[in-house]
Image (tube, rainbow, N blue to C red):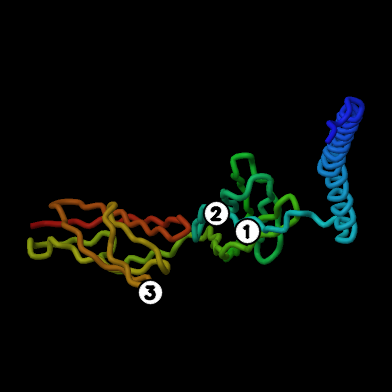
Amino acid sequence: MHNSSPVSSRLARKEQKKMTQQTIIFSAIAIFLFLLFIFVIVPGVIRLAGSIVGTNLGNSPEDTIPPVAPIISSPVSATNSAQINISGFAEKGSEAVLVLNSEEFSREKVSDEGSFEFEVPLQDGENTLAFYAVDEAGNESGTTKTYRVVADQEAPELVIESPQDGTEIISRTNQQLQIKGTAGEKAKVYVNDKLLFTKSDGSFSGSFQLQEGENKLLFKATDEAGNTTEKEITVRFRL
């Protein structure tokens, strides 16, 4: 057998080198095409698909979640004022809506701290108030409970049945004076700042310890709205 000639060996090495170079070039091209697909073609396809879907949906807003209903500082149940202030909290950036006597009355922008306040005018008698919120996307929250506020500027009636003004009482056995009368419904009655027992029909009763000589009794009836009626009587007592 004869060994391969030097010429054949050189040709083989040259051919192998050529194949290696081609492999490197093809690998580089493949890597480039792969990166081009991942970073250019795929994002472009995603953007195109999103644009088509958005067009088909009429560019509807992404935010469809309604805000939470406002939290309200409960108003008084009755007042003698023609206006009350009501504050509360709601989603930042939304609007708080006041529904007064079953009709939308006004809207207030919720502050960056999430607070708002309404000045609410009242009509005589019962007023109903409810609130809801509307966010920047137009989503509406549920409505709060309905609050009822009575506006009343009429002073309660106060009738003192016993004792009569100017009454003179004699004897230690009568020193504990019995008091009774009537006032407006749900009114509180005081005599010299002492609260008397009041029934649901407005009648009241109680007692008062007389001192010898002249006793001045100041009666005061106050209703739920804060209106007050006062009467003073004098009773003389001798042992």
* Mark 3–mark 1 distance (CA, rounded to whole Å): 35 Å
Q: Residues within 10 Å of mark 3 (few under 14, many from 20)?
A: few
Viewer-proximal residue, 70 or 179?
70
In this rendering, is residue 57 above or below 108?
below
Query: Picture coordinates of residue 13 (x, y %)?
Result: 86, 29
Q: In the drawing, does residue 55 fall left or right of residue 144?
A: right
Query: In the displayed structure, would residue 121 be above or below residue 158?
Result: above
Q: How many marks?
A: 3
Q: Mark 1 — residue?
A: 131
Which label's residue is closer to the chain start, 1 or 2? 2
Mark 2 lies on residue: 72
| Residue 27 sits in quarter | top right
Q: Secondary structure at mark 2?
A: strand
User: Under tag 1, what secondary structure?
Assistant: strand
Q: Is residue 175 left or right of residue 68?
A: left
The amino acid sitting under disc 2 is Ile
